[in-house]
Amino acid sequence: MRVLEDDMFPSTPGKVKIERATAMNRQLHRCFASTSTMFLWALFLVAMTASYLSFQSFVDTSSKYFAASWGGLHWERQIRASAAPRRPPGSAAGAGMSVLVTGAAGFVGTHCSLALRKRGDGVVGIDNFNSYYDPSLKKARRSLLASHGVFVIEGDINDGRLLAKLFDVVPFTHVLHLAAQAGVRYAMENPASYVHSNIAGLVTLLEACKDADPQPAIVWASSSSVYGLNDKVPFTESDRTDQPASLYAATKKAGEEITHTYNHIYGLSITGLRFFTVYGPWGRPDMAYFSFTRNILQGKPITVYRGKNRVDLARDFTYIDDIVKGCLGSLDTAGKSTGTGGKKRGPAPYRIFNLGNTSPVTVPNLVSILEKHLRVKAKKNVVEMPGNGDVPFTHANISLARQQLGYKPTTNLDVGLKKFVKWYLSYYGYTRGSKNL
């Protein structure tokens, strides 16, 4: 036991204190050394992170710059050439307009651009060629426009820099704003796209217009969907529009309020057009008449919705040529904007018109007309209309447009669908019995 005790307690007490102090110093040194090392490593990591983020920001900015599909002297020459009016000197219709058409590769945008160019107006188009429906159809429309001397820029109306550049290159007299996220049912799948295009995009465009010198007059596409749950027929511009049945309708109603604000504050001349179910050649594949045609030819069943109490749905189908006449009439009668440098100098026109056919047709009737022109019987599944934002009927009162624009639709559904079917069979190269559509 003595040996153990001697081993446990050294014979020199002072030595214990010295060794303990030395050990503590070594531990403190290690601690401080470790802390300093960790601090240095932390600083190093922070510096590396900051450098990476700065580099990434540079790469992103550079990528956007180099990926931009616009800019440069050649691009500017194309813009100016396309925007130049080509009416003969001394023309009774005047010198001609220079029009920026948004959504130019869309259905209505293509037809309006062609009509403007045909009569000698300057036209520049912009379209983002999104994939809401087959972009190849939009690119085919762009090729059609190019063959008639209309240049279409691939760009987004949310790109303020691009819009500012366009107004810097060309003093547009008018803007025909047709770009939008369309479709009632798709809003349930991708609501953000409607806010992005129909509200944010509209504001970006209006900002560019109010800052332009001179300010252009603006004609833009609202929608008959703003009438929502209104059950008073026919729909008149003064009817209530505060009960939208879909997000799409709500964004279009918001657009009417936003454009009114820019008219009031900045003196922008604004004309809003409430389209009623536009159809015809080069139309949108998501529309019922288009998808019905495709499925009937392929031998597939079509879904026909009906309202409550087994009531057939009805639409005021309006042929594209009649809509074009209303759009051009609105451009021709649009008063001038009154602002300069973003400041209002006096009151400017603010107008809203219905553009419809005034002759609603039931969906089963539409199908019967298609069957006649396609010479194929449809396989129909008739189901109750789901709560997806659709309304049971639309019917336009066009008295105001007739009075102020000289608007007078002339194409009934039978004639219009015959023209559409002829285009469809030609465009898709359909031969009887083919399933490759």
Image (cartoon, rainbow, N blue to C red):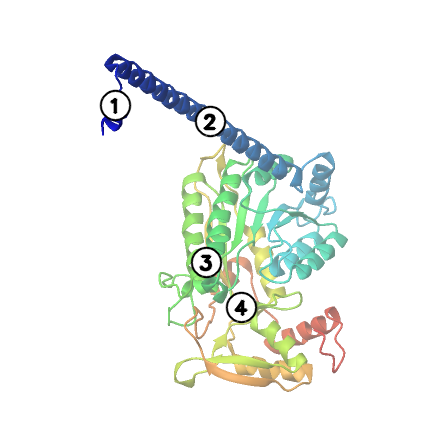
Callout 1 amino acid: Asp
Which badge, 1 or 4, is on the more N-terminal residue? 1
Quadrant showing the C terminus: bottom right
Report if the CB atoms under discs 2 and 3 are less than 8 Å apart: no
In 3D space, how far apart are the residues under numbered discs 3 and 4 (Cα atoms)?
21 Å
Element carrying mark 3: helix
The residue that mark 4 highlights is: 277
Q: Label 2 sits on what residue type?
A: Trp
The label number, if any, that marks residue 6 in the structure image: 1
CB-based contact (under 8 Å), mark 2 and mark 1: no
Residue to which mark 2 is pinned: 41
Residue of label 3: 191
For the residue labelled by badge 2, is the local secondary structure a helix, a strand or a loop? helix
Out of 116 and 428, give the one closest to the viewer: 428
Residue 311's place in the image compared with 172, above or below, is below
User: Which residue sits at x=75%, y=82%?
Assistant: 432
Q: Nearer the viewer, mark 1 or mark 4?
A: 1
| Residue 215: mark | none
* Spatial separation of the CA atoms under disc 2 and disc 3: 46 Å
**Mark 3, mark 4: which one is toward the viewer?**
3
Residue in the image at 52% along x and 44% along y: 205
Q: CA distance from mark 3 to mark 1?
A: 85 Å
